[in-house]
Image (tube, helix red, strand yellow):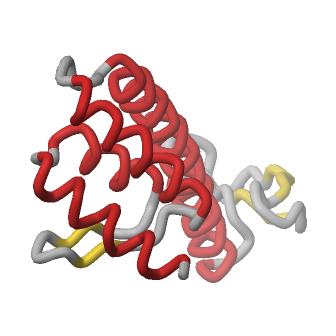
Amino acid sequence: MIEIEQATCKRCGEPIELKEIGPNKREWCSPACKQAAYRERENKQAQQRIAQLEQELAEKDELIEQLLGKKQSKQPFKRSLQERLTRLLEQQDWPALDIHYRVKAGQKEGRVFIIGASIDLLSRALGQLEEQQS
């Protein structure tokens, strides 16, 4: 005689009959429920990975901000250009610049440009922004 054990589906809770005892016990009421449970697990893992990557990105952005805050030119004229350009970019919400040297929009991109640009590029950027303001 076959022993019948009563159990419920791991996903939906519907009752299922277990006809075999052992390692091949049924855990889902149907193949569709089994597939749905698999997709739910995959989705949960993907969401956890996204959250982890967002946390890592936030940490990297914070590190970049710290490094950008420490980096300043030792040349007084260049530093004054950097400070003027920073103020203008902040006032205009960090727009993109195209001064034969493309600078993408965004605070991080603008600040990286300000630190690494030559006096000539800083002057051209200031000229473009001041022209846009008038």
Residue at 51% from the left image edge and 57% from the top image edge: 88
Residue at 52% from the left image edge and 45% from the top image edge: 54
Q: Which quadrant of the rendered structure holds the N terminus?
A: bottom right
- Residue 75 falls left or right of residue 54: left
- Residue 62 falls left or right of residue 112: right
Number of numbered discs visible in the structure rendering: 0
- Nearest the viewer among 50 and 59 is 59
Percent x, y for residue 102?
Answer: 19, 72
Percent x, y for residue 89?
Answer: 48, 58
Seen in the picture, residue 58 relative to 99 is either above or below; the reply is above
Residue at 11% from the left image edge and 55% from the top image edge: 120
Q: Which quadrant of the rendered structure holds the C terminus?
A: bottom right
Seen in the picture, residue 10 relative to 80 is either above or below; the reply is below
Residue at 61% from the left image edge and 69% from the top image edge: 34
- Nearest the viewer among 112 and 87 is 87
Percent x, y for residue 36?
Answer: 64, 74
> Within the image, what quadrant is residue 121 found in?
bottom left
- Residue 53 falls left or right of residue 44: left
Percent x, y for residue 82?
Answer: 33, 41
Seen in the picture, residue 23 relative to 42 is either above or below; the reply is above
- Nearest the viewer among 127 and 8 is 127
Seen in the picture, residue 114 relative to 15 is either above or below; the reply is above
